Image: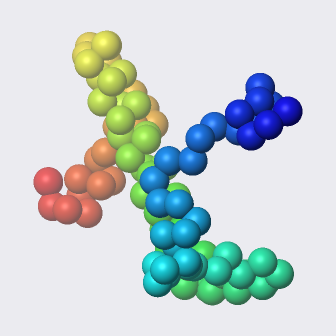
């Protein structure tokens, strides 16, 4: 089958190969290079973000629960909210 056969891929859009060879920068993918290991600061930052996201999730759950059943407070979320309120001086 020719280049336009049913098994041919889609037509190339954008810059053609001849345009790339005329001075456009080509970035090497670095095949075969090993990734550098994660540093302790990166892991600590990820742990802090995970803790903060967990606290935000608990507070969001408490907010939704308090909107649904405003007659009685939630024990988990209310305790957390009271603790955070004391930390920030509320």
**How far across and how far down the image is residue 56, in percent?**
38, 47
Q: Residue at x 49, y 80 (%)?
A: 22
**How far across and how far down the image is residue 53, in percent?**
45, 52
Query: Colour scheme used in the picture?
Result: rainbow
Up/down of 86 relative to 21, above or below: above
Image side of residue 31 versus residue 21, left or right? right
Image side of residue 53 versus residue 88, left or right? right
Could you say which quadrant of the image residue 17 lies in?
Answer: bottom right
**How far across and how far down the image is residue 58, in percent?**
43, 40
Image side of residue 28 versus residue 2, left or right? left
Seen from the viewer's position, the closer of residues 84 and 52 is: 52
Q: Residue at x 24, y 58 (%)?
A: 86
Q: Residue at x 26, y 63 (%)?
A: 87
Q: Quadrant for the N terminus, please.
A: top right
Q: Residue at x 30, y 55 (%)?
A: 84
Seen from the viewer's position, the closer of residues 79 and 28 is: 28
The total of numbered circles placed on residues is: 0
Q: Quadrant for the C terminus, please.
A: bottom left
Q: Residue furthest left?
A: 90
- Residue 56 visible, this orientation: yes
Image side of residue 23 versus residue 83, left or right? right
Seen from the viewer's position, the closer of residues 73 and 59 is: 59
Up/down of 9 relative to 19, above or below: above
- Residue 37 visible, this orientation: no
Seen from the viewer's position, the closer of residues 64 and 82 is: 64
């Amino acid at each position: 089958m020719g280049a336009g056969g049913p098994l041919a891929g889609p037509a190339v859009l954008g810059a053609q190969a001849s345009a790339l060879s005329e001075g456009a920068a080509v970035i090497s993918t670095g095949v075969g290079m090993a990734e550098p290991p994660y540093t302790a600061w990166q892991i600590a930052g990820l742990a802090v973000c995970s803790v903060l996201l967990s606290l935000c999730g608990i507070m969001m759950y408490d907010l939704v629960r308090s909107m649904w059943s405003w007659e009685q407070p939630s024990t988990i979320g209310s305790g957390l909210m009271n603790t955070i309120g004391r930390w920030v001086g509320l």
